[in-house]
Image (cartoon, rainbow, N blue to C red):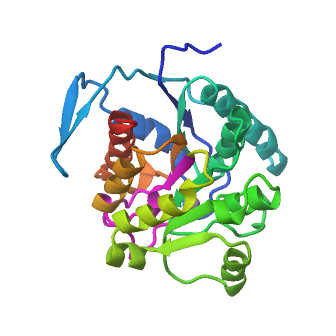
């Protein structure tokens, strides 16, 4: 039984079995949470972005014990996914779930858990990511790896492609992956579009378009959506990314919406001695908590 007095529950999910390029995302949650500054006790705050004033009602945040996994062979991923799913379902039925990964497979399990905790399942999924994560299988990992989580959710009919908006895509991609995105009507915005049009316009378009039918937004932030100059600490960095300002601004805008869950994944502290990647991830979560529903 979880304590109902808490408004936000943070769950660390150090799953790193299904990443493919550079291991280390299992250290992400601890690094992010170490950078997470919980000392602020405020009644109201002013946001320097627009001098807007936000009244802070009591916001209680709690952190649960990080999940542990025993993965020795490929099939061990299934109980791991189930464990994440059940933990998130329990968390989401009592408070706002904030999940810190871990690789992007964490989001596959987290979205399933959130969906089980709510009645109206027609939610919008907004994913910040350099990659579309709709690949199929990966050698030695099979169907569940960090590049397939959206495809699994679609193919297993948990969500439809048109419920998904991916922001920050770039680089080169196989034609059949692009075809999957188009044929499943997945909405996407490249980092080039974001840098040209601005995140405010893009989010306005997504939220206006979806407002008629959506029952909340699940927000997944893959830290590799950022340009490696802002977030070098990640397994699969891609140049031409979005800026830290863009992502922080996006979180501030989305904090005003009805959200059903938030995750930040793919922080890999082994590749960032400066620690700015984990500081930025912590700042995203912190800013979300402070501004949510204000
Ligand atoms: Mn990803």
Q: Give yes or no for residue 169 being in the magenta stretch.
A: no
Ligand 1 in which quarter? bottom right
In the image, residue 57 lies at what x, y percent?
Answer: 32, 22
Q: Which residues are magenta?
A: 217-244
Instruction: Determine the main secondary structure of the stretch shown in magenta.
Output: loop
Residue at x 76%, y 60% (from the top left corner): 154
Residue at x 50%, y 42% (from the top left corner): 258
Q: Quadrant of residue 135?
A: bottom right
Residue at x 37%, y 56% (from the top left corner): 250
Q: Is residue 53 left or right of residue 68?
A: left
Q: Is residue 94 above or below residue 88?
A: above
Front one among 153 and 136: 153
Residue at x 78%, y 66% (from the top left corner): 137
Q: Is residue 196 left or right of residue 25?
A: left
Q: Quadrant of residue 53?
A: top left
In the image, residue 72 lies at what x, y percent?
Answer: 77, 43
């Amino acid at each position: 039984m979880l304590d109902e007095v808490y408004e936000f529950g943070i769950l660390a999910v150090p799953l790193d079995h299904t990443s493919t390029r550079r291991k280390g995302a299992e250290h992400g949650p601890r690094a992010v949470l170490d950078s997470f500054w919980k000392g602020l006790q405020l009644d109201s705050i002013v946001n320097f972005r627009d001098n807007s004033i936000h009244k802070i009602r009591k916001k209680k945040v709690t952190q649960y014990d990080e999940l542990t996994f025993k993965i020795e062979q490929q099939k061990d991923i299934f109980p791991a996914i189930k464990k994440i799913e059940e933990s998130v379902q329990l968390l989401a039925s009592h408070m706002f779930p904030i999940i810190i990964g871990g690789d992007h497979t964490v989001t596959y399990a987290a979205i399933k858990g959130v969906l089980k905790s709510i009645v109206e399942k027609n939610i919008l999924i907004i994913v910040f990511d350099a990659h579309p994560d709709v690949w199929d299988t990966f050698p030695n990992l099979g169907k569940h790896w960090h590049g397939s989580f959206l495809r699994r959710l679609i193919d297993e009919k948990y969500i439809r492609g048109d419920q998904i908006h991916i922001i920050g895509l770039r680089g080169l991609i196989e034609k059949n992956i692009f075809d999957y995105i188009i044929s499943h009507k997945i909405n996407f915005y490249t980092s080039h579009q974001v840098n040209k049009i601005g995140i405010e316009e893009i989010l306005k378009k997504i939220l206006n378009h979806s407002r008629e039918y959506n029952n909340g937004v699940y927000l997944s932030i893959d830290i590799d959506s950022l340009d490696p100059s802002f977030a070098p600490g990640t397994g699969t960095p891609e140049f031409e990314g979005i800026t830290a300002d863009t992502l922080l601004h996006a979180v501030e805008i989305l904090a005003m919406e009805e959200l059903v869950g938030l995750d930040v994944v793919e922080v890999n502290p082994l590749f960032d001695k400066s620690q700015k990647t984990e500081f930025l991830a912590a700042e995203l979560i912190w800013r979300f908590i402070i501004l949510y529903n204000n």
